[in-house]
Amino acid sequence: MKDHFERVIDYMRISITDRCNLRCRYCMPADGFTNIIPREQILSFEEITRLAEAAAKLGIHKIRLTGGEPLVRHGIVDLISRIHAVEGIHEIGITTNGILLADMADDLKKAGVSRVNISIDTLDPEKYASITRGGKLDKVLAGIEAAKRVGLTPVKLNVVALGGFNEDEFGDFIEMTRNEDIIVRFIELMPIGHADLGDSYGFISNKEILSRFPELVPVENEKYSVSDDFQLPGGKGKVGFISALSNHFCSSCNKIRLTSDGKIKPCLHSNDEIDMKGPLTLSDDELLEALRASVNRKVEHHLLNEGAAPIERDMNKIGG
Ligand code: SAM
Ligand code: SF4
């Protein structure tokens, strides 16, 4: 499926829940339950699978499950098996905070997941508990080890760059890529939703990080990659920079997003949403038409740097 700007759209991110077992300061309000999506509005597995089938018919080959925290949704392994069985879906990934991964990695792999992105902003247990409002770092580290052991590889680590909070650890994260085929990706902090965006940390651009590590050499980016990739000389892994604000990657955007309450978001940084109005109530043709319409509503590039309206949905209700 192509959009109006000749971009091939072959990737759908599905947020399967807005619930989470952490409360990262930049993502969710402290009381994550104040404006939670009512359970009856959350898409069922039947609805998600039907949407995946329709999307596959239109050329979506790759699916990533996210959230909230996808691993807290009961029955996720069953959901993955269903999506894996959809003709045309060639790759299923998960973005997770890793807290529950150690116990689930094996089942996820067997059900059809090929790779995982694990979010980890600090390697210090106290700082981790502070930024996530109570998370246990050792669980994430065990999750990373389990992902490697069962072959959910190459593991990607997502690190939100937080000025004044984890700046002193950027070098440690980069060092992890020297002897291991691991991909560390620095993500610029994005102004989304109602989270705390800066009382205890500030925006730091990827350009600034790169300037501090001149030894990093550029390498070819993956096709449709959202990151600019680099490597330590002789390093086994890679270091990526996801610069949604300072150097957006809209011209190579190949995705649409499905929220857990059944809205298609053509662009992460826009409030535009297309309500799928209960995918089981639509005919096959209506469903395909609705998906096509959402791809046609993709904008050429986001306007965050040009004063666009702030994004209303919290990040845990969109899925990063
Ligand atoms: N719970 C899972 C996790 O943390 O990986 C999946 C959902 S989370 C919303 C997906 C990604 O979005 C995470 O890597 C997280 O760090 C990132 N994220 C959340 N809020 C953000 C913000 N305001 N700016 C930049 N990245 C953000
Ligand atoms: Fe939960 Fe992920 Fe948001 Fe953290 S970033 S609160 S783990 S959804």
Image (tube, rainbow, N blue to C red):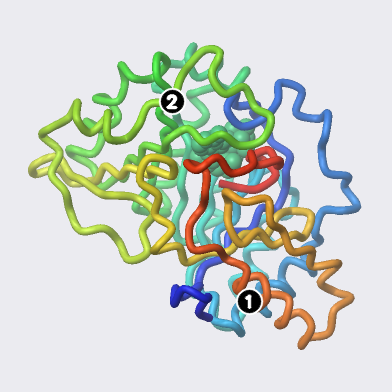
Which residue is under mark 2? 203
Give amino acid for label 2.
Phe
Q: Secondary structure at mark 1?
A: helix
Give amino acid for label 1.
Ala
Q: Is residue 245 above or below residue 259?
A: above
Crowding near the residue tagged with mark 2, few <14, some 14–19, many ≥20 C-alpha atoms within 10 Å: some
Mark in the foreground, 1 or 2: 2
Q: Is residue 282 above or below residue 313?
A: below
**Position of residue 81 in the picture relative to residue 32 (left or right):** left
State which quadrant residue 233 falls in: top left
Q: Are marks 1 and 2 in contact (CB under 8 Å)?
A: no
Q: Secondary structure at mark 2?
A: strand
Q: Which mark is residue 20?
A: none
Per the model, the C-alpha gap separating discs 1 and 2 is 36 Å
Q: Position of residue 149 (x, y in %)?
A: 39, 47
Q: Work out whether residue 299 or residue 45 is closer to the camera in this orientation and state it.
A: 299
Quadrant in which ligand 2 is drawn? top right
Q: Which mark is residue 55?
A: 1
Residue pictured at 36% horizontal, 58% vertical? 225
State which quadrant residue 144 falls in: top left
Residue pictured at 83% horizontal, 34% vertical? 35
For ligand 1, tell me if the residue under mark 2 lies within 8 Å: no
State which quadrant residue 86 falls in: bottom right
Is residue 90 at least partly visible in the picture? yes
